[in-house]
Image (spheres, rainbow, N blue to C red):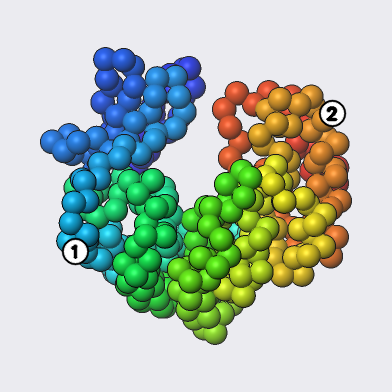
Amino acid sequence: NWKPWTFFDGTPVLVPEKFNIMPESNGDILQYPEGDRSVPASMRMPKDGFYHDSIIRQKPIVDESKLKVEDQVEEYSIMGDEDLACYEKEAKRLYEETDRAVVFGGVPGTNLGDIALVPGPGMKNPQGIRDVEEWYVSLMTRKDFLKEVFSQMTEIGLKNLKLMYEAVGERIQVIVLSGTDFGSQNCPFISPALYRELFKPYHQAMNEWIHQNTQWKVFIHTCGSVFDLLPDLKEAGFDILNPVQVSAAKMDPKELKEHFGSDFTFWGGGVNPQSTLPFGSPEDVRQEVRYLINTFKPNGGFVFANVHNIQAKIPVENLLAFFETLQENR
């Protein structure tokens, strides 16, 4: 039930029926969890912006003993019959009526520590660790608590994976298990040792179930410089690496292909979205796209795409160069 809406610059778009906005006096736009304006807003789009940012609503943590795992996993639940029936119907339609591979965006409980979800933007009254900075500090200072959180999430995730497979079977080919960004522009957010301690055991448990019981390929989305984490992500059971941020430190395409080309399918890495696509010339775009295709394509294992979303205000000529060069080099 999509409905029309208009961006600040006049661009017409479609938004879901429950998309709700309230403008502020300074021109910013607020979103409210579940459309309930009796509770504080959870998202803000700055005036003339294109994205909503989470509003941090965490209450001060004055007593560590009162942190509850239940609060931290409140938004994750076992999938209900109505949702499963919807996924079953849509997977059947796509499988039978198209010639495309089908990618499923994931089930509740599998996405450990995704910072986009930590603030609880869809929750009316999020409890626990809901501040971005506090969360990253907690990776070092509250390890035992987070292990309990991830353990309970994994239990929920495994149950949902089983229910999902019962509903869609092999009609999907790819499942997104994690959207947690482990890399910043210049280095990983966490050390390999900390990934092994906090995340890897739970990723392995879910990926092992998938590989033992389905033919699905497992997709991980993680932005930034993650080269140093790739050996562990491989051992954790991930098949597909996205978005392949070639503009980040140590993410040289040739090094990635040489060292990990037989371990991962690279999904992305089609052009540098931080400089070449927005600020280069059309010829710059063509040259870089040709180079990246020629680097990642040999022997397969490459799904061509821009590194990340195609942002607003990209020159149309650059977009045409991007897609035309793909067609010329398929």
Q: Is residue 48 above or below residue 318?
A: above
Q: Is residue 239 above or below residue 94?
A: below
- Give coordinates of residue 194: x percent, y percent: 51, 65
Residue that numbered label 2 is attached to? 283
SS type, badge 1: helix
Q: Is residue 69 visible?
A: yes
Residue that numbered label 1 is attached to? 65
Could you say which quadrant of the image residue 315 lies in? top right
Q: Amino acid at mark 1?
A: Ser
Crowding at label 1, few (<14), some or many (≥20) Cα neighbours within 10 Å?
A: few
Q: Amino acid at mark 2?
A: Glu
**Residue at point 44%, 32% (across, down):** 51
- Give coordinates of residue 262: x percent, y percent: 77, 70
Instruction: Classify residue 78 as left or right of residue 95.
Output: left
Which residue is nearer to you in this view: 119 or 191? Answer: 191
SS type, badge 2: helix
- Give coordinates of residue 229: x percent, y percent: 62, 63
**Residue at point 78%, 52% (across, down):** 253
Circle on res. 116: none
| Marks 1 and 2, how far apart at CA | 59 Å
Could you say which quadrant of the image residue 277 lies in? top right
Instruction: Classify residue 8 as left or right of residue 308.
Output: left
User: Mark 1 vs mark 2: which is more N-terminal?
Assistant: 1
